[in-house]
Image: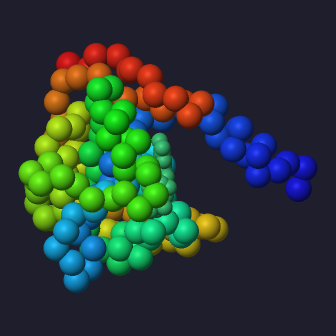
Amino acid sequence: MTFTINDLKNTFTRYTTGVTIVSCIPPGGDKPIGITVNSFTSVSLDPPLVLWCIDRHSGVFEAFNGADDYAVSVLRDDQADISTRFATPGNHDFAEGETETMVTGAPVLKQRLAAIDCRVEARHDAGDHVILVGRIVDCDYRPGKPLIYVARSYLTGPEIV
Ligand SMILES: Cc1cc2nc3c(=O)[nH]c(=O)nc-3n(C[C@H](O)[C@H](O)[C@H](O)COP(=O)(O)O)c2cc1C
């Protein structure tokens, strides 16, 4: 290989994304958990599919990989603190009353720019990550400004009405 892991990281930080909190109820549990995710992407309109990738080293890998459903909360520009919170190792719990459910029963943040509620359609091994493909069973959106992530920093996106 002509590049190092550091080259890869520096390359990836030049790619701009939004920020989401992906959440689920772990198998056999009842307490919602969440993780900060920017690997989320839309995949297909018909059927409606999305995906995100979870690190096999994550403390919540087994929980998300074993769950039948997940929900994606797209963050607003004033929610960088929530992104930092759910990116902190071992910190995956929601506060009382912070979430609600849509169709699948997976928790979604009450405060959000948009939400996507999914049933897991497929799991694909992908190196040190697993790709979790979800079939959308419900979604919603609100006016506001998205939280943007680039070069390990948060920015404000444009107002979307
Ligand atoms: C903006 C941002 C995006 C992230 N995206 C992902 C992601 O797509 N997949 C992932 O597994 N981890 C992602 N992470 C890292 C996890 O949020 C973080 O490693 C995890 O919450 C750490 O907790 P753990 O060690 O208990 O797993 C991201 C972190 C940040 C700040």
Q: Nearer the viewer, residue 36 or 17?
A: 36
Question: Residue at (37%, 50%) from the top-left corner?
Answer: 86
Side of 156 where 17 appears, left or right: right
- The reply to whether residue 122 is in sight is no
Q: Is residue 27 above or below residue 69?
A: below
Side of 153 where 139 appears, left or right: left
- The reply to whether residue 29 is in sight is yes
Q: Nearer the viewer, residue 93 or 70?
A: 93
The colour scheme used here is rainbow
Q: Nearer the viewer, residue 77 or 49?
A: 77
Q: Is residue 6 above or below residue 146?
A: below
Side of 59 where 31 appears, left or right: left
Report x, y in % for residue 26: 27, 73
Query: What is the residue that sits farthest to the top in this orientation?
Result: 159
Question: Residue at (39%, 20%) from the top-left corner?
Answer: 156
Report x, y in % for residue 59: 45, 69
Quarter of the figure with the N terminus: bottom right
Report x, y in % for residue 141: 18, 35
Query: What is the residue that sits farthest to the right in this orientation?
Result: 2
Numbered marks: total: 0
Side of 85 where 89 appears, left or right: right
Question: Residue at (28%, 16%) from the top-left corner?
Answer: 159
Question: Residue at (41%, 62%) from the top-left corner?
Answer: 90
Q: Nearer the viewer, residue 136 or 159?
A: 159
Query: What is the residue that sits farthest to the bottom in this orientation?
Result: 28
Quarter of the figure with the C terminus: top left
Report x, y in % for residue 58: 49, 66
